[in-house]
Image (cartoon, helix red, strand yellow):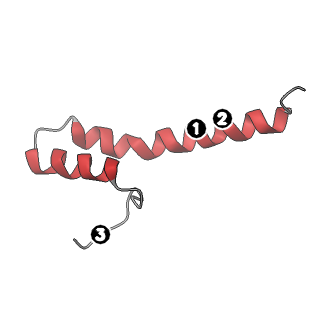
Amino acid sequence: MDIPGWFAWLALALAVLQALGLVPVVHRLRGLDASAQFQARLDLLDDRYVPGARYWT
């Protein structure tokens, strides 16, 4: 049984969206600010992280 073409495009689109969501986190991980690096590590662990959203912790 072959994988349908639309499924491959859907998987590719989801992978691209996930990679784009990680760009801000990776940018903060590579920065010089230690508190931003720590917050970026917490964002990677948090399953509710939405890039660009403001969180009150």
SS category of the residue bearing label 1? helix
Across and down, in percent, residue 37 comes to 17, 44
Residue 55: mark:
3
List the residue tagged with mark 2.
12
Indicate the amino acid at tag 1: Ala
Above-or-below relation of 46 to 5: below
| Label tally | 3
SS category of the residue bearing label 3? loop
- Is 42 or 50 nearer to us in this picture? 42
List the residue tagged with mark 1.
15
Q: Quadrant of the N terminus?
A: top right
Q: Residues within 10 Å of mark 3 (few under 14, many from 20)?
A: few
Q: CA distance from mark 1 to mark 3?
A: 25 Å
Q: Residues within 10 Å of mark 2 (few under 14, many from 20)?
A: few
User: What residue is rendered at 21% in x and 34% in y?
Assistant: 30
Above-or-below relation of 32 to 55: above
Sequence-first disc among 2 and 3: 2
Across and down, in percent, residue 10 comes to 72, 41
